[in-house]
Image (cartoon, rainbow, N blue to C red):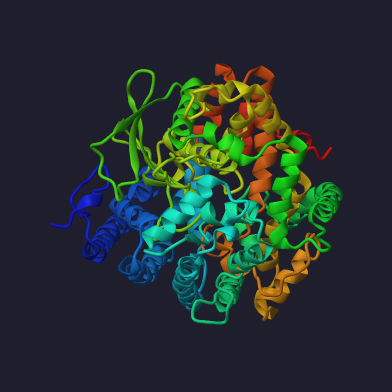
């Protein structure tokens, strides 16, 4: 019996075998097709209920199987799973096209859309109708047959290229290891990091220490290792992922993905991919995004140049460094930060034991939104590292199921993300609750130490949990508008706003206790965390803007004339680069956010959402960071509403006004 084809509530991970996936997909696609057929050939006149709502509720089993499978492909993959992903992706893409290019189905959708003024729909129903109609029109429903055929070819090719792009990065990350046998090469590295590197070597049956390109290994080495040559080696390996003109090279993938996206946009009547994407964003046009990025660039660049000059002078004074290079940045920034604030991650880490930080983010969510978290051991999971929780409200009603997967391993891609195994929606009077997952890559506990987080990792955990809350507290009727199904430049608001609590004394005192002594984090350290929060903020902002500008250069112009990925990138980075160029490295070939994830033409949204989050948090600060009234407004108008209404309208309902840029500039020390 195939466990994916019997009805299941929580995903049946322990029963799954790789051979279950293809038959499950095949059956679920057939079932979803039958549902679509029934909607298309319904003899009754098209109505909102029998066409639009029916469409949104269709294919639920396929959605579940897809979410289980693709989450495994990100968090616990192997060669077999990757092969299945390559095989199934174009099939799913083709099935999606079969729906959006189905003329008879579109006629029914259009018939409802054309009479929307007379239908007396709720705001959520209007939004869903609009979304469904655009889902067809923006995906080729109005095209001629030959153009529809070309669209299908583009989508099938793109889905394979994106997978290939991601697999190459994972393979490159796993392939590289810096094996050190001389302890002097580790000079400057904190004891905990040394121990982790020794443990990694031991796991591979090697003597000495192992440094890899996974963040928990890479970042500390770049930050603390005194050996400049080894920092350079590691930095170039990291920066040149999939840029070696070999079988794992991504340059061709980048060019092809960008060109196919452009061709697709043109087919649909849009000038560029960015014009197509941004029509469904708060920012609306590439021009507005460019204007937004340039305005911030103008504000941040002078500050960044001052900060860089300060860093150069410091490195020269400290070690006689004549030319600061990219592999020196993190190292001397950390040293300068320690000098200015007498604050280093090693001083802070003992106060951020992973279990305490998890308990802390739960407590913050409890104080704000009345949630209660219970770790449970009867929910199936895909790896022993995964923790599972049931979440209840104040009346002991189930709110959500939560999976947390916090440590790196070979089958898991780098970075951190939130995802869902099951959406929230209301059907036949039942409010079906969501299953949400957070995946991160934090240092594993060692023989002598628990998992202790850097402050940056603490904010990452809060960030992903903010996305998690957006999924958990979802309270919409239709699955297509639930949780994080919102405009892409709005999706980072719940995650980024939650990071603010990490800097507040009132919140830190709830969970930041020394793992050995139980002592609460001293106030002077909290003050230093706050003071150092704007340290090199100009340089940080410039870095973020450079990524946003690079994204727009691939997607906001015609990429068909681009033949050299590195040259294209160098042109963009001219405006934002503070360090000398490194010919051996290339960001685009491993820029997974825009070439593999969903951020194409959307990387600016991190900064866009920072404007929203700074403005939103200013409201919390004004009333008290645990103020129930503000928290309830945020829950009611932002977290629970998903994509049921235009995000600017939702934001104004919460805040009483449109967001202002000043709180961000003030927080960043850029005013």
The answer to whether residue 243 is visible is yes
The answer to whether residue 113 is visible is no
- Count of marks placed on residues: 0
Which residue sits at x=43%, y=66%?
101
Picture quarter with the C terminus: top right
User: Quick check: 328 left or right of 152?
Assistant: right
Q: Position of residue 526 (x, y in %)?
A: 65, 27
Q: Position of residue 305 (x, y in %)?
A: 85, 52
Picture quarter with the N terminus: bottom left
Examine the rendered structure and indicate whether residue 250 appears above or below residue 655: below
Q: Position of residue 9 (x, y in %)?
A: 25, 42
User: Quick check: 328 left or right of 631?
Assistant: right
Q: Where is residue 539 in the image (x, y as percent from the top left)?
A: 76, 50
Work out whether residue 18 or residue 265 is closer to the camera in this orientation and state it.
18
Examine the rendered structure and indicate whether residue 360 appears above or below residue 612: above
Examine the rendered structure and indicate whether residue 541 appears above or below residue 200: above
Which residue sits at x=40%, y=36%?
477
Write down the quadrant of residue 104 in the picture: bottom left
Work out whether residue 96 or residue 343 is closer to the camera in this orientation and state it.
343
Write down the quadrant of residue 458 in the picture: top right
Which residue sits at x=30%, y=50%?
382
Residue found farthest to the left: 1
User: Quick check: 354 left or right of 601?
Assistant: left
């Amino acid at each position: 019996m195939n466990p994916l084809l019997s009805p299941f509530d929580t995903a049946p991970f322990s029963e799954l075998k790789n051979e279950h996936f293809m038959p499950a997909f095949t059956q679920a696609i057939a079932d979803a097709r039958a549902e679509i057929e029934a909607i298309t050939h319904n003899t009754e006149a098209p109505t909102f209920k029998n066409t639009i709502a029916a469409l949104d509720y269709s294919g639920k089993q396929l959605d579940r199987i897809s979410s289980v499978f693709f989450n495994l492909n990100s968090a616990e993959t192997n060669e077999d799973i990757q092969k299945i992903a390559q095989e199934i992706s174009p099939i799913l893409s083709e099935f999606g096209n079969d729906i959006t290019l189905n003329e008879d189905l579109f006629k029914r959708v259009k018939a409802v859309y054309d009479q929307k003024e007379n239908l007396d729909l709720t705001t959520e129903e209007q939004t869903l109708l609009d979304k469904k109609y655009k889902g067809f029109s923006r995906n080729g429903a109005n095209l001629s047959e030959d153009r529809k055929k070309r669209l299908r070819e583009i989508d099938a090719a793109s889905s394979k290229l994106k997978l290939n792009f991601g697999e190459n990065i994972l393979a490159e990350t796993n392939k590289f290891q810096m094996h050190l046998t001389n302890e002097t090469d580790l000079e400057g590295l904190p004891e905990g990091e040394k121990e982790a590197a020794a443990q990694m070597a031991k796991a591979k049956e090697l003597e000495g220490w192992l440094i890899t390109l996974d963040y928990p290994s890479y970042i500390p080495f770049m930050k603390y290792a005194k050996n400049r040559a080894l920092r350079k080696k590691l930095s170039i390996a990291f920066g040149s992922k999939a840029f070696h003109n070999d079988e794992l090279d991504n340059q061709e993938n980048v060019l092809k993905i960008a060109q196919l996206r452009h061709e697709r946009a043109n087919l649909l009547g849009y000038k560029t991919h960015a014009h197509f994407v941004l029509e469904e964003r708060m920012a609306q046009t590439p021009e507005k995004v460019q204007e937004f990025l340039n305005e911030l660039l103008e504000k941040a660049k002078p500050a960044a140049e001052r900060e860089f000059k300060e860093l150069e002078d410091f490195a020269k004074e400290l070690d006689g460094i004549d030319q600061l290079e990219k592999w020196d940045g993190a190292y001397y920034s950390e040293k300068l930060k320690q000098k200015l604030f007498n604050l280093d991650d090693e001083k802070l880490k003992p106060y951020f034991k992973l279990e305490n930080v998890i308990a802390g983010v739960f407590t913050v969510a409890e104080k704000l939104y009345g949630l209660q978290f219970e770790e449970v051991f009867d929910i199936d999971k895909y790896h022993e590292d995964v923790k599972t929780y049931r979440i209840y409200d104040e009346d002991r009603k189930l709110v959500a199921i939560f999976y947390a997967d916090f440590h790196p391993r070979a089958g898991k891609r780098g970075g951190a993300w939130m995802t869902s195994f099951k959406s929230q929606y209301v059907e036949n009077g039942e409010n079906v609750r969501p299953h949400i997952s957070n995946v991160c890559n934090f240092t594993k506990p060692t023989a002598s130490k628990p998992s202790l987080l850097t402050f940056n990792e603490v904010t990452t955990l809060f960030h992903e949990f903010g996305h998690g809350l957006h999924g958990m507290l979802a309270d919409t009727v239709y699955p297509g508008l639930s949780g994080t199904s919102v405009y892409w430049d709005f999706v980072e608001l719940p995650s980024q706003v939650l990071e603010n609590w990490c800097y507040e004394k009132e919140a830190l005192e709830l969970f930041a206790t020394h793992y050995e002594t139980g002592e609460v984090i001293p106030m002077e350290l909290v003050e230093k965390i706050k003071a150092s929060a704007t340290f090199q903020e100009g340089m940080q902002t410039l870095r973020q803007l450079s990524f946003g500008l690079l994204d727009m250069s691939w997607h906001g112009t015609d990429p068909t004339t681009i033949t050299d990925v590195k040259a294209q990138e160098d042109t963009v980075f001219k405006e934002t680069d503070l360090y000398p160029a490194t010919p051996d490295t290339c960001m685009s070939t491993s820029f997974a956010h825009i070439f593999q994830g969903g951020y194409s033409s959307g990387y600016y949204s991190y900064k866009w959402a920072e404007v929203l989050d700074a403005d939103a948090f200013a409201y919390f600060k004004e009333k008290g960071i645990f103020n129930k009234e503000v928290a309830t407004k945020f829950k009611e108008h932002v977290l629970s509403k998903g994509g049921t209404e235009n995000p600017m309208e939702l934001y104004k309902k919460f805040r009483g006004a449109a967001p202002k840029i000043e709180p961000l500039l003030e927080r960043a020390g850029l005013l």
